[in-house]
Amino acid sequence: MEALLALMISFLLVAATASTGVRFRPDKWYVELNKPAWNPPNWLFPVAWSILYVMMAVAAWRIFLAEPMIIKWLALIFYL
């Protein structure tokens, strides 16, 4: 039960962080940038960031489940 609660908290923290990307959209300056031809399409960024955020939440959860060590708590503090 504690592991599931930790996973939910991890996802909530990541979702709160990800919500800043929804709130603060790129301005006109970004749209007008002269981008290279190999620049990914705009629709790919939310997909890529969603995958990264899920992986970060799972990584933090796995660190939380690790054996108690000082490095575990330092890693979680650094993550937050």
Image (cartoon, rainbow, N blue to C red):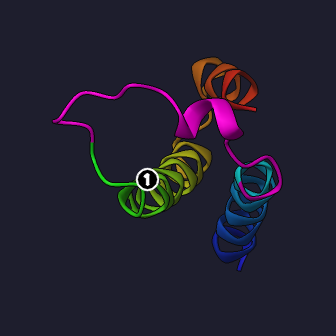
Instruction: Reply above or below: 69 against 9.
Output: above
Q: Which residue is mark 1?
A: 45
Magenta stretch: residue 78 in it?
A: no
**Residue at the spot x=32%, y=54% of the render?**
41
Instruction: Reply above or below: 11 against 57.
Output: below
**Residue 36 figure quarter:** top left
Magenta stretch: residue 28 in it?
A: yes
**Residue at the spot x=70%, y=27% of the render?**
73
Magenta span: predominant SS is: loop
Q: Secondary structure at mark 1?
A: helix
Q: Amino acid at mark 1?
A: Phe
**Residue at the spot x=69%, y=21% of the render?**
78
> What range is drawn magenta here?
22-39
Q: Position of residue 10 (x, y in %)?
A: 70, 58
Q: Position of residue 33 (x, y in %)?
A: 48, 27
Q: Is residue 35 left or right of residue 65?
A: left
Instruction: Reply above or below: 54 against 49.
Output: below
Could you tell me which quadrant the C terminus lies in? top right
